[in-house]
Amino acid sequence: MPGPRVVPVHGDEALPDKVDVVVIGGGIIGASTALELAERGQKVALCEKGGIGQEQSSRNWGWVRISRRDPREVPLMVEALRIWAGLDERLGRDTGYNRAGILFTCADDKSYEQHERWGRNLEGYQIEANMVSGSALDALLPGGRMKLKGALHTPTDGRAEPQKAAPAIAEGARDRGAAVLTECAVRGLDIEAGRVCGVVTERGRIGCQAAVLAGGAWSSLLSGRHEIRLPQLKVKNTVLRTAPLEGGPESAVWAQDFAIRKRQDGGYTVASGHENIVDIVPSSFRFALDFLPALRKEWRSLSLRIGGRFLDEARMARHWKMDEASPFEFCRVLDPKPALDMSDRAFAGLKAAFPVFEKAEIAQRWAGYIDVTPDAVPVISAVDAIPGFYIATGFSGHGFGIGPAAGRLMADIVTGRPPAVDPKDFRFGRFSDGSKIELISGF
């Protein structure tokens, strides 16, 4: 079954000889970084091995949320909400953004108290979030028949269309002078006197002073090519979408059994509220100690499986010459098979909660690989070992909504401007400087 239908972006034919910054990876993080840099007068090349937004940037739930985030991400997400509010006008394109609110439901007293406690993370920000119950909650869940203690309601949260957003942002970057290069894998960095002086692509070399790696699930592989150890693994999430349906909730809803958001076409995106698959691959052993604390804390929500993906990655080269094809050229798009059992359970839970979905037609299913770090917090940072090399990756399933602000912060770091938020928690060095790597719950 093919992946989601992404708005096509036609890449530029000409490869620039030299730019200020090469951004590697055409998902929402890379596109947002390219946009921000181009708006600051930087000459930018955005290089994507496949098509713009074809991997996780188009396969996620489409939530634009501050609610239930790791507290370390909250300041950056505040900035993201400001950016999303004016993004369509800024780009002159439609991202599908709609500030329709998000509800995190609470089945019992314990869950209610956890969500209420999480809301304190927003104190001091002009972000509305409140606990709702009774008739107020019923009004937000028309036709629902869940037995709930209440819900955390964040009206300023919203949604956008993953199949539209990254392409729109990339086109906006091109409008501002960036080169957008699709089917143009970066094989590696060109390093002279210890610092970045260019990148080598499958189509030739591009000279540059800086390179930003925003390669999603591929970032660790490219970093490793240059002996930079980036602890990163992949988690598979499965999504289905329904045909247009009237009578469902307007707000996005998270429950233990399912998570939904209304789509721009009137259908709904549906996924499990808590289940994910972790394919055991060679990197699982390579980074086992890094991820052991996270596994202990989240094991109930992770299904560990071993299958064909292990052999696929075992056969994948970890070192290659610049004049030979890289692994990125042999897999243009990660398009894993959806886990039908998980999406069936989520859909059944949704129909039990909202009878209107009994008549919903499943239009499509797909899966995507989420790039995760040991503490589930992204890296948005310079790499001290290679001056001119920067990484923006590991968004751990939180990247779509925060993407525009992550691009702004990355551009701040590259250009030396005062950062939009304190980047300390996103520094790459935390994995090697003896810092405590801690997985903090969204509560």
Image (cartoon, rainbow, N blue to C red):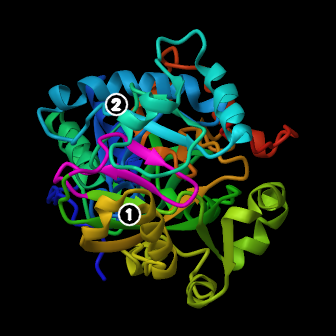
Which residue occupies the foreground of this view, 443 or 3? Answer: 443
The reply, left or right, for residue 361 in relation to residue 347 is: left
Q: Which residues are magenta?
A: 247-267
From the image, tell me which residue sits under label 2.
Answer: 37
The secondary structure that dominates the magenta segment is loop
Does residue 359 sit above or below 122 in this rendering?
A: below
Question: Can residue 63 be seen here?
Answer: yes
Q: Position of residue 225 (x, y in %)?
A: 60, 65
From the image, tell me which residue sits under label 1.
Answer: 55
* In the image, residue 250 lies in the stretch drawn in magenta: yes
Identity of the amino acid at label 1? Glu
* In the image, residue 229 lies in the stretch drawn in magenta: no
Q: Which quadrant holds the C terminus? A: top right
SS under mark 1: loop
Q: Residue at x 35, y 40 (%)?
A: 251
SS under mark 2: helix
The reply, left or right, for residue 356 in relation to residue 69 is: left
Q: Residue at x 59, y 81 (%)?
A: 313
Q: Position of residue 187 (x, y in %)?
A: 45, 66
The reply, left or right, for residue 57 in relation to residue 134 is: left
How far apart in space, not on screen, are marks 1 and 2 (Cα)? 23 Å
Does residue 120 sit above or below 55 in this rendering?
A: above
